[in-house]
Image (cartoon, rainbow, N blue to C red):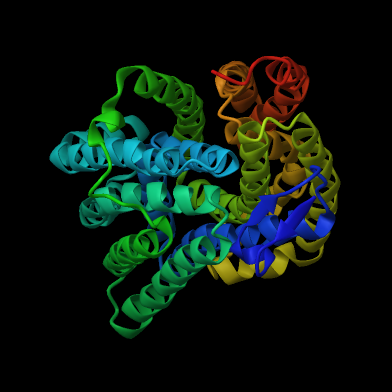
Amino acid sequence: MFEVQGSVMKGLVLVGQSVLTDKEYLGITVPFMLSTMTQPLMGAVNTALMGQLSDPKYIAAVALGAILFNNIYWFFGFLRVSTSGYAAQALGSGSKEESLLAFLRPLFIAMIVGCSCIILQQPILTAYIALVAPAADVAELCSVYYEILIWGAPLVLFNYVSLGWLMGQTRVRASVFMQVSSNVLNIILSMWFVFGLHFSIEGVAWATLLSQFYGAVVGCLLMRIYGDFDYRKFNYKTVLEAGTLVKMLSVNANLMIRTACLLTVNNILAATGAALGTVTLAANAVLFQMKDIMSYLVDGMANGASIFSGRALGQKSKELFWQTLRMTYKWLFVLIILLMSVFALSSTFWISCFTDIVEVAVLAEAYKEYVLVYPLVAGIGLALYGMFTGATYTAPVRNMMIMALAVFLLAERFLVPLMGNDGLWISFLLFVGSQSLILFLSLSKFRKIFKKTYKSVY
């Protein structure tokens, strides 16, 4: 069964039979859930800070700026996801060389992409503003936010890789510390810069950039401590070995397609909200911050599930994989009930925390029921995403997102003209609900994987 060396927080090692207990599963997933939740909390605090200013244009500008960076960073979020899967598989197989390669290969891609973002910063901003077409004052504020934060692109992508490696190696304390400390620093600096130094939107941008730099420094230190690699004797030519690199890029390409579909939806949500007016855009931004807190909590559980899924593949243990799936279903149900109950009882309070602009708060109240049902509709899809990516079996994830995007585009085309913002929210729920259904139906393909020789899962 699984035994803990020192504690659950130091990582799990399989000895004997593959028996996964609630304690061991929660020992990995709960810390990931709590640390992952600090990410949307950071955005929530920035939105709340802007919501205390005199005009909804500040909330709208931060919301659009956040979506723009989501466009950039989420598109390359595979660097964290696939690194975690490969690192977990390397841990399962016990290979030091594969463990180092699981870090260096995505790092090579991360640095190229990060530097390219800085070089192309102006065309990216121009294209985005033209696409979303916000009000002139909102566009100006969004540009100020972007022109500060874009310099953190290489830092963010390095953080993705180092965090993914630490998570895949079940260095839970290290990965939690890295996420939580940088996000808490961001929150503290944002409050100080906005309320103490009166920097307005520039304050939250500088606070985020400084916390990204801090996270990169911490990531370097943690990789030095936990990597334990002999860099001098390593054959660096293997990093760019054609066959293996093509397989990795194939996995990542599927995740990029998935992210491109997700970002298409987010951009349509932003553009449609902007077309419905700045107040509607601001109200939706408030509600989406609360939705993001829910989704990141479930995503934290998915991160934990992906570790066990990847290790099951590395150890060639079908039993462990299906135990992980059953355990994920059980605790996902508990989490969904908890999230819906808390939101139903306290949503008005949280809306008031985000903004004291009456017209924004009233509109957010009118649409909050859509956020209430979100975890029920989206939960299975988010959790199964972790199971699939942990095994680096990403073709179903790609196919799922393409089909879900088609559902969203069709619904949005017909429902928004008829129902306005209600139609937009219903289209979004159909989008996430389709993901849950399609990934659930795709699970049968996993049985075929574990009947093969385990040489490839692509």
Residue reaching furthest bottom?
A: 196
Tell me: 9 left or right of 83. Answer: right
**Can I make out residue 420 in this image?**
no
Q: Where is residue 202 in the image (x, y as percent from the top left)?
A: 27, 65
- Name the residue: 25% across, 45% down: 233
Q: In this view, does 140 lie to the left or right of 306?
A: left
**Quadrant of image for the C terminus:** top right
Quadrant in the picture for residue 450: top right
The answer to whether residue 348 is left or right of residue 138 is right
Residue at left 51%, top 31%? 262
Mark yes or no: residue 426 visible.
yes
Question: Percent x, y for residue 281?
Answer: 49, 47
Q: Which of 182 and 165 is in front in this view?
A: 165
- Nearer to the camera, 370 or 276: 370
Residue 384, relative to residue 34: is it above or below? above
Q: In this view, does 164 lie to the left or right of 20?
A: left
Residue 399 location (% of width, % of height): 59, 16
> Picture coordinates of residue 125 (x, y %)?
24, 39
Name the residue rendered at 67%, 43% in the picture. Answer: 308
Compared to residue 12, the image places residue 352 above or below, namely below
Instruction: State the residue in front, 36 or 241.
Output: 241
Residue that extends furthest to the left in the rendered view of this protein: 119
- The mark total stands at 0
Residue 20 against residue 458 in the figure, above or below: below
Q: Which of 197 and 214 is in front in this view?
A: 214
Q: Residue 437 occupies which quadrant of the picture?
A: top right
